[in-house]
Image (cartoon, rainbow, N blue to C red):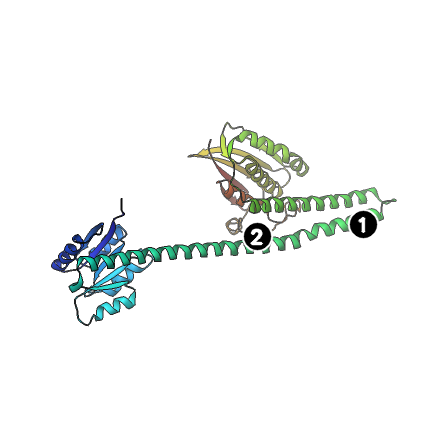
Amino acid sequence: MPTLTRILLIDEDGRQRATVATALAGSNLKYTLVEADGAEAGVAEAERQSFDCVLLDSDLAGAADLLGRFISPEGGRQAVVALTDRADHDNTAALLRAGAVDWLSRAETDPHTLARAIRYARARRAFVLELQAARDDAEEKSRALDRLNRQKTLILSIIAHDLRNPFQVMLGMSQLLVDSAGGGDSAVIARRAGIAHEAASQAHGLLESLVSWASLYMEARVAETSAISVDELFQNCANAMRARAEHKGVSIETRPTEAKAITQPDAAAAILRNLVANALKFTPSGGQVTLSATRRGDRIVISVADTGVGMSEAQTASLFQLERRSTSAGTDGECGAGLGLLLCRDLAEWIDATLEVESQLGVGATFRLLLPSA
């Protein structure tokens, strides 16, 4: 079944509208016709639906302004054909310069000529819309490429800066250990070994984040989801992070839940581990990190709450922005590259999850991961 051509006819003169309608009826066009007796009525009809062709009386008061509205992106990029009965066609020429695709003298509005002009207007509009869609797509791809290039530059700067420091510490401490291998104060040797170990842990954590992040972008695969037990997710995370928590004197509490979520298991586990690691980093000895889950509509809300130092509103607002990445020392002087939460952001986007954060300076922070409910 052929597609109907949607036509809007705007003319204050009812007899002239009838003449055009009669010519259309005698053509071989398959169409729907909407008539408007003035600019205000024409605008109202155009707001209700999109038209393939607008037949506009060139003598209508404010015709040029009306044309500009119709051909604008906000007006739907309508294709406008100007109708005139003046011999000098002054108004028509002005409309053509302003963007009308064609003009017709009312004396020439026979069925064949009118149908040809409307078909041309429809084809022109389709071309303009296709061209604009291609331009929008190219611009979006260009913006995406710019974002990727900025991310690549920033990641390279992170590697150059943050990865160099721990290796310099390891090299320096290991050399001191070599020099004191034949003797020396055992307490000093132990302290130097501890510093070297902490630097190695920092470098290893940075490398893990970089590899995970790079893998996510390079593979660009669709996340394969399945139903998981949130309680099991909590227990696995707590077991993996318990040694770090005990070393710092921070307790990890997991509140039992029967909730199940639909997600990519490895990604959800990685997000939770990073959130807990971040909570431990900024929670002093004697503090607590709590893992809990609630339901919000069709989502399971996984919360990681700590009793740490918290954040200001400005820090919270820029937390997941790579360009405004900042690194703060933990409560025991722990260092980091500031990549953990950015990795969480990208992983959450990949698995159709949402991250939220709520914090109060000096009180603590709560991060929430919203997953589809099973």
**Position above or below: 250 against 192:** above
Describe residue 45's horizontal placement relative to residue 297 as left or right.
Answer: left
Image spot of residue 343 (x, y percent): 57, 45
Badge 2 or badge 1: first in the primary sequence: 1
**Nearer the observer, 85 or 204:** 85
Count the numbered circles shown.
Answer: 2
Label 2 element class: loop
Where's residue 41, x and y in %? 20, 55
Which residue is located at x 48 percent, y 54 percent? 141
369 or 29, which is in the foreground? Answer: 29
Q: Which residue is mark 1?
A: 175
Q: CA distance from mark 2 to mark 1?
A: 33 Å
Q: Residue furthest right?
A: 182
Q: Is residue 79 left or right of residue 182?
A: left
Q: Which of the 4 image quarters holds residue 309?
A: top right
Secondary structure under the numbered disc 1 in the rendered image: helix
Query: Looking at the picture, which amino acid does disc 1 mark?
Result: Gln
Mark 2: amino acid: Arg
Crowding near the residue tagged with mark 1, few <14, some 14–19, many ≥20 C-alpha atoms within 10 Å: few
- Is residue 309 visible in the rendered image? The answer is no
Q: Can you give x and y, in whole percent of width and height, for residue 247 in the image?
A: 68, 37
Q: Quarter holding the N terminus?
A: top left
Where residue 33 sits in the image (x, y, percent)?
A: 20, 52
**Residue 82 appears in the figure:** yes
Decide which of 356, 223 is in the foreground and name it: 223
- Residue 265 position by quadrant: top right
Give the labeled residue for mark 2: 325
The reply to whether callout 2 and callout 1 are in contact (CB within 8 Å) is: no
